[in-house]
Image (tube, rainbow, N blue to C red):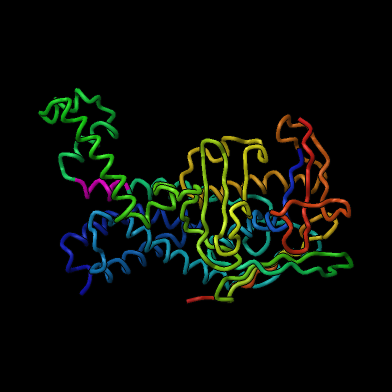
Amino acid sequence: MTLDQGLLGLVRALPVGWRFAKVHPRRRELPEQVVVAAGRAAVVTSFASFDGSARFAVVSARDTLETLAVHLHGVRGE
Amino acid sequence: MTGAAIPGLDDVLAAERPRLVRLCARLTETTEAAEDLAQETLIEAWRNGHKLRAPDAVQSWLSGIARNVCLRWARRQGREFDRVLVAGGHVGTAGGYDMTEPPSDFDLDVELERDELATLLDRAMALLPAETRAALVAHYLEDAPQAAVAARLGVSEGAVAVRLHRGRLALRRLLATELREHAAPYGLVAPDRAGWQETRLWCPRCGGRRLGRFDAATGELALTCPACFPEPDAIPDHVTPLETGMPGLFRGIKGYQAALNRLAAWQHAYYAPALVRRAAPCVKCGAQVPLRPGLSPDWQPPPSVRRGAGSFCAATAVG
């Protein structure tokens, strides 16, 4: 038997991802992007609120899935 | 018109204040702001008292206002987090977030869920005839035998049995009609022919409502979106006890949101250390087995993880 877990699920399960989901229950998954970060191949997994005002992105090393950076852009207020 | 026009509302609001302070403290994880947020909740409730259509649902109504007040507060705080939290591979505490520890309110939704379910039941019970309600309360909530209920109400045991039967039917009907919107997220509304129920969760692809199948007893949770995945067999999110090794993972949970939170807590606790050690405990026997992170040229991930760039990790259980 093999367990498998997509990067998307790993990112969603991060405490910071969970918190973003709590504040923005209606959010959109954005397409993953392959980038180079700190000289390493990396994948950017990101979510945005449906009104586009808040965004959450995680940069993960593509070979180890190690979290390299987390970006939060919460611009929506009252 | 304001809440002052609702007889007794001022007293109710004053009595609810301590509960709202506790609720706001749990929602925001800060006791410093909780007093102010509870006060803001009470002011908003007083201003909008004329909108309270079911006075017996005042607790649920106030909890809803408090959640919105706390949400607005959290969004205001969110402006302060508009920056990079972690960089250079270091994962730690930054910007007020601890990146490694699950937040203490991972299971807060379970607590809120219980509160909301109790409130929902109160609302449904309040809509029943008094004699039916008395029989249901005595038998199901106070655990009194039918004979004792009959003696207390001054009727025959047969009459109590009839009242209980009619009461159950009436409750089921209320939850499926008048209170359907509130009952559906907790699996209290009958599923469709394929077993899917309405949820309050949004699809992250199209923004529509997701459908769910959830059985806390067996530890199975499935979520789909009829617009994005019209094929009956295409279930984008599906977890079973075989995958978690924990049939009791969802014990005590009724609703989908709380189940998702519990699952996220498990995923984080399982995979975060495993990614560092490159090994994960077998979900059957606990033996450490290799974890294969990243892309493998000969590995074909299942459809549920084929989205995006296809990055995934896998652990082979040996049980």
Residue B242 percent location from the top left of the image: 66, 37
Q: Quadrant of the N terminus of chain B?
A: bottom left
Check the image and report above or below for B90 versus B120: below
Write down the quadrant of residue B17 in the picture: bottom left
**Front position in the image: B226 or B54:** B226
Residue A67 percent location from the top left of the image: 76, 58
Q: Does the image show residue B137?
A: no
Residue at left offset 79%, top offset 56%:
A65
Number of numbered discs: 0
* Residue furthest to the top: B147
Residue at left offset 42%, top offset 65%:
B68
**Front position in the image: B244 or A64:** B244
**Front position in the image: B247 or A74:** B247
Residue at left offset 18%, top offset 65%:
B6
Look at the image and say whether residue B154 sits in the magenta stretch. no
Residue B4 percent location from the top left of the image: 19, 68
**Front position in the image: B146 or B258:** B146
Q: Does the image show residue A73?
A: yes
Residue B213 percent location from the top left of the image: 52, 48
Write down the quadrant of residue A28 in the picture: bottom right
Residue at left offset 63%, top offset 59%:
A16
Magenta residue span: B121-128
Quick check: B150 left or right of B169? left
Check the image and report above or below for B308 versus B282: below
Q: Quadrant of the C terminus of chain B?
A: top right
- Report the predominant secondary structure element of the magenta stretch: helix
